[in-house]
Amino acid sequence: MPNQFKLHVVPPPAPLEWTHPRQLFKKTLWHHLIQDSHPIGHFYIEMESEKSNAYGVSRVITGMSRQNRNLSTLKVALEQIGMGTFFYDFPGKLDSGVDARRGVEWARQKGRLKTVVVPLSSEQAGLLFDELHQWVLNGSFLHYGGGHQILLGQGSGCAEMGAHFFNLALGKKAVPESWIRKVYAPNRLIGGGNTGRKVGMLKLYLEGLEWAKGPEDGRLIATPDMELTWDWLEKNHPGKQVVTLTPEDFPGTLEPVERIRFTAGYPVASEETLREQWARLRLDPA
């Protein structure tokens, strides 16, 4: 079995159209209503090692997801969170190996899958497995959201997690800037949390005609984006569904990648939880 890391890139069913908040809201809502498996796209990470870890696992596939997508969507509507959904701490989970493998195959059949392969040394593979172990041990896997600082172990969405492990596999901050979506959500359209604002769907639709100009009247949304990643892969490797990348493919990138520091202070997982999660994540469950 080779030592390798894979980033599976699944774009949304159609472009989300980030022209302004209203258009983004319309397309995202539609993708949820049609019950698409990946309404905003998804990153899956897959890791293989020639050596099994302490739980007898040498191959995993997973990604970060909400514990219940439909309930989370209902929560956003009922609590009138508006664009606060980008920064909300939703109950999270790691996709099981069975679900992730099924999701990858579904995307492949739909023509919505590109896979990046990064060859690893045995030591690198061990490091990636340990990072995932720490992700579970320190409770980060239970917190899904774009407002989290992943390097503090607060949790993340699937995009930030996928990008972090991609960087870790390459040994430096290699995620291209062109993968990152950056806009400022208008403060007046961010509800929930400690904002004191209620932003219903009607308000978001009526007033969401432009992004904020900057931090003085908005909050930055900066996240790896599955559409942009797909476009980068298609531009640089046209027509390829599987692309192998190494550190040499990013010659201008010198900054080393940081490991997660896990200072969020979440409860530490029990040994039973650790065994349960590794059994869920393995690609070839016993």
Image (cartoon, grey):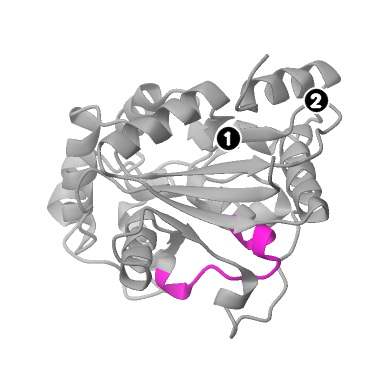
Mark earlier in primary sequence (2, 1): 2
Q: Give the residues in magenta.
A: 166-178
Q: In terms of image quadrants, where is residue 280?
A: top right
Residue underneath mark 1: 61
Residue 175 belongs to the span the image colors magenta? yes
Q: Secondary structure at mark 2?
A: loop
- Front-most of residues 20 and 96: 96
Question: Callout 1, which amino acid?
Answer: Ile
Question: Callout 2, which amino acid?
Answer: Gly
Q: Secondary structure at mark 1?
A: strand
Q: Residue at x 63, y 33 (%)?
A: 60
Crowd band around label 1 with a 10 angstrom C-alpha radius: few (<14), some (14–19), many (20+): many
- Left or right, 251 with reference to 99: right
The picture places residue 161, in percent across and down from the top left corner, at 58, 49
Residue underneath mark 2: 56
Residue 70 vs 202, above or below: the answer is: above
The picture places residue 16, in percent across and down from the top left corner, at 23, 52
Q: Residue furthest left?
A: 206
Q: In terms of image quadrants, where is residue 49?
A: top right
- Disc 2 versus disc 1: distance between alpha carbons? 15 Å
Q: Residue furthest bottom?
A: 252
The picture places residue 156, in percent across and down from the top left corner, at 57, 46
Q: Which label number is shown at residue 254?
A: none
